[in-house]
Amino acid sequence: MDTKVVLLIGLKAEVSESEVSAWMQTFGTVTHVQCLRDGNPNAPIALVKMQITQAQGFFIVSRLNSRWYKGSLVTARVMVR
């Protein structure tokens, strides 16, 4: 398995790294979560490092893209290196 980064956009302002980590653990092993609030603190972006295969990354994106999480519409992408 490789380390892949899943990008989550559209989260609520009050979301925490631990919340995102717990949510994403249902899809695979999470090694690190970083919530970026630099551009707009009311719309953080989460970078989730996971130990997953490319196929698992595709599955995660297909499950999470355009889904509601705690009242917010989330967009998910796997970052390509």
Image: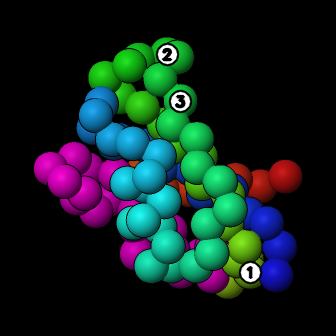
Q: Residue 39 has which mark?
A: 2
Please tell me whether mark 3 or mark 1 is closer to you in this view. Answer: 3
Identify the residue at the far top of this view.
39
Q: Is residue 54 visible?
A: yes
Q: Earlier in the sequence, mark 3 or mark 1?
A: 3
Highlighted range, magenta: 56-74
The structure residue drawn at horizontal position 74% and vertical position 80%, both measured from the top left corner, is 53
The structure residue drawn at horizontal position 58% and vertical position 49%, both measured from the top left corner, is 33
Mark 3 highlights which residue? 36
For the residues labelled 2 and 3, the Cα–Cα distance comes to 8 Å
Q: Mark 2 and 1 residues: CB-CB less than 8 Å, in contact?
A: no
Please tell me whether mark 2 or mark 3 is closer to you in this view. Answer: 3
Q: Dot 2 surroundings within 10 Å: few (below 14), some, or many (20 or more)?
A: few
Magenta-drawn stretch contains 41: no
- Percent position (x, y) of residue 67? 28, 62
Residue type at numbered disc 3? Leu
- Percent position (x, y) of residue 72? 22, 47
Front-lying residue, 66 or 70:
70
Q: Mark 2 and 3 residues: CB-CB less than 8 Å, in contact?
A: yes
Residue type at numbered disc 2? Gly
Question: Does residue 44 sit above or below 67 in this rendering?
Answer: above
Question: Does residue 37 sit above or below 29 in this rendering?
Answer: above
Q: Is residue 78 visible?
A: no
